[in-house]
Image: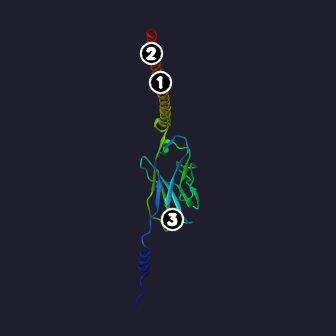
Amino acid sequence: MAPPAPAAAWGFFLLALGPVAAMETFTSGTLEALNGTDVRLKCTFRSPVPAGPKLTVSWYFQSELKEPLEAVFYYNLEAYPSKSGRFLGRITWDGNVHKDDASVMLHNVSPKDNGTFQCHVKNPPDVDGDIGEIRLSIVLKRSFSEVHILFLTIGISCAAMVILVVVVVIWRHWRRTQQDKTREVGRSEQLKLKEGGEEKETPLSGQGTCRS
C-alpha cells in the first residue's frame, strides 16, 4: 500500500489543529492634525502567535487623488524608513512589537499629507488579517469646535455651579429672615395680648374695693 501524499498529510494535520485566528489590526480610522506639528499614527495589533523575529510592519500611503499606494515605512527587528518621496526623513518608528504596537510618528505635517495611511502587520505563520487604515486631515488652524467649545462647556458648567450655590445661600438667608420675622410677630402679638389682659383686670379690682 502506497504511503499517503505529503500534501494530504499536511492538510489533515492543519484540520486537526482546528481554526487559527487571523491577525487583527486596530487604528483610529480618522485623525486630524494641525499644520506644522508632529502626529502619531497609532496602530496596534493582536496575533495568536507571539511576536517573533519574522514579524514585519509595513506602512503605505495613498493621497486624496487616489494615486497608487506608496511604501513609506518598513519594520523588521529594526526600522527602515523610506529613502525617497514626500515622507523622506519625516517618519520614525514609535512602536513596540512586544507590546502589540506598530505605531509611527509623522513629523512636520502639511496639507500635502492629506490621505489614507495603511498599517500592515504580518507575524508568520499569521500573515492573513485585516488592514488598519487612518484617514489623515491637516488643518491650517485649530477649529473652534475642538478647543473653544471644550473650554466654553467647562466655563458654563462652573458658572452654573456658582449660580446654584449663590441661589441656595440667598434662599436659605431669605428663609431664615422670614422665620425670624414670624417669630418677632408672634412675640409681639403675645405681648399685646398679655398687656391687654392686665389692663382689663385692673379696673375690676378697683370696683370691688369701693363696694366693700
Furthest residue in direction front, as rendered: 212
User: Could you tell me which secondary element the residue under label 2 belongs to?
Assistant: helix
Position of residue 139 measured from the top left corner of the image (x, y, whole percent): 48, 39
Mark nearer the viewer, 3 or 2: 2
Element type where label 3 sits in the image: loop
Of all residues, the one furthest to the top in this rendering is 210
Query: Residue sitting at 42 percent across and 73 percent down?
Result: 18
Q: For mark 2, what is the residue?
A: 201
Tag 3 and tag 1, C-beta contact below 8 Å: no
In front here: 7 or 178? 178
Mark 3–mark 1 Cα distance, whole angstroms, equals: 84 Å
Q: Are marks 3 and 2 in contact (CB under 8 Å)?
A: no
Say which amino acid is labelled 2.
Answer: Glu
Q: In terms of sequence position, does the residue under pointer 1 or pointer 2 come before the other?
A: 1
Q: Residue beneath label 1, please?
A: 183
Image vertical order of residue 183 relative to residue 12, above or below = above
Q: Quadrant of the N terminus?
A: bottom left
